[in-house]
Amino acid sequence: MRNFIRKILPLAFVFTVIFTMTAFASDFTATTAEITSQSRTVDEGTLSDVSTFSPAAPVTDVFATDLYIQNGRVFLEIAIIGYGDRRVTLDGRAVTATRIRTVGNPVYAFIETYDLGPATAGTRTLNFRTTSFNSPWNTITETFTVTVY
């Protein structure tokens, strides 16, 4: 019986170590994230009804200002110059900003923060589309592909 225990105990220990490593490998938190691809589409709208008395400036630019990992999650900050609606998707699903800051007095820009999910290795695609609230009703679409290592 002792020989049996001596043979089986190391085997049980090996299996315990193997399964423990397998279970925790999926909890790996990455430490690096970068925008690996970015594309832009601009629809200039129409200038036929331009008014110098518009209530707010049209959208003129959209760009990423920061990408960071905090508390095990990936965040992307996007600056929007001007006023417009937003349609934002992350890997095809609609998302909303987790934080919105304003720039200027009077306000002329916004910085929105988007949570891209857990900081696990992989690629995520954030599609950001905004159309001006007023003339020339232009649309800017930015697609950010973020890779986490």
Image: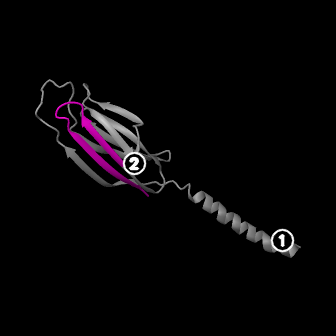
Q: Residue at x 25, y 49 (%)?
A: 40
Circle 1/circle 2 CB separation < 8 Å: no
Q: Is residue 4 left or right of residue 19?
A: right
Please provide percent x and percent y for residue 120: 49, 54
| Main SS of residues in magenta | strand
Please provide percent x and percent y for residue 108: 24, 30
Magenta highlight on residue 49: no
Q: Residue at x 62, y 62 (%)?
A: 21
Q: Quadrant of the N terminus?
A: bottom right
Magenta highlight on residue 148: yes
First to last magenta residue range? 126-149
Labelled disc at residue 92? 2
Q: Nearer the viewer, mark 1 or mark 2?
A: 2
Q: Secondary structure at mark 2?
A: loop
Pointer 1 local density, CA inside 10 Å: few below 14, some 14–19, many at least 20: few
Q: Name the N-terminal-most of marks 1 and 2.
A: 1
Q: Amino acid at mark 2?
A: Gly
Q: Residue at x 35, y 45 (%)?
A: 66
In this figure, what is the number of numbered marks?
2
What residue is pinned by disc 1?
5
Q: Secondary structure at mark 1?
A: helix
Q: Is residue 25 left or right of residue 149?
A: right
Please provide percent x and percent y for residue 82: 24, 33
Q: Amino acid at mark 1?
A: Ile
Quadrant position of residue 123:
bottom left
Please provide percent x and percent y for residue 63: 28, 44
Pointer 2 local density, CA inside 10 Å: few below 14, some 14–19, many at least 20: few
Quadrant position of residue 62:
top left
Q: Is residue 98 left or right of residue 59?
A: right
Q: Quadrant of the C terminus?
A: bottom left
**Mark 1 and mark 2: span between their CA atoms?**
55 Å
